Amino acid sequence: MTCRRAFLLFLALSAPLSAVVAGGSDVDQDIPITLAAYANARCKKGDPIPLAVTVENGLKSAISFGTFSLDPVPWNGETSSLTLVDVYRNGENGGLFLGRPKIEPPEQTQSPSHYVLKRGQSLVIKTDLSKWKIRGGWIPGRYTATVRIENLATERGRHTVSVLSEPFSFEVIP
């Protein structure tokens, strides 16, 4: 499948944005929780690929998000509820994703922190995309990717949703 076809399929499946709650039942209405992901437009091969993912709560009630960190840490704690879903290079057929970063917390690490977002509030998670393993490695080329935030708790914890970003693009240069 070409990147263009995958993008069109993504658009068809994601509009309007609705979520599936844990347990598999569809939510009766659209869930106004948005996710925007941005990578640096150009990164040099071998350097980090900075990624900022913004979660914004448009619900009437608060949502909560659990993670070990909002910023990159050597043991990958910021990736605990963040998934690289799709990544394509130079419009090639087939995704490149091979594996997520291994999370190895220090012995004295406590449980994940929970961040509560009231209506209209947002939260930014920063990480390095190069922590994920992809086929062929992060070699020079033009990339398109999507990410997903998992385990957002809504309605006082009665529902858990995952939200997918729109595709974003960046370039790795020699």
Image (cartoon, rainbow, N blue to C red):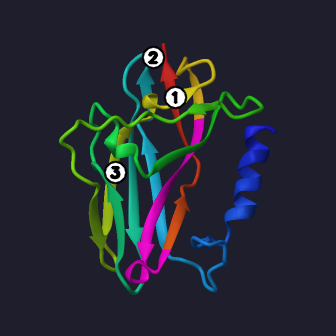
Q: Residue at point 64% right, 86% down?
A: 28
Q: Alpha-carbon distance for marks 3 and 1?
A: 21 Å
> Disc 2 residue type?
Lys
Q: Which of 103 and 18 is in front in this view?
A: 103
Q: Residue at point 43% right, 77% down?
A: 154
Q: Residue at point 75% right, 53% down?
A: 8
Q: Name the residue under label 3.
A: 125
User: Is residue 69 placed above or below 120 in the rendered structure?
Assistant: above
Determine the secondary structure under disc 2: loop
Relative to 45, 66 lies left or right: left
Determine the secondary structure under disc 1: strand
3 or 1: mark nearer the eye = 3
Q: Which of 129 and 133 is in front in this view?
A: 133
Relative to 8, 139 lies left or right: left
Q: Where is residue 91 in the image (x, y as percent from the top left)?
A: 71, 32
The reply to whether dot 3 and dot 2 touch (C-beta < 8 Å) is: no
The reply to whether dot 2 and dot 1 touch (C-beta < 8 Å) is: no
Q: Mark 1 points at which residue?
A: 171
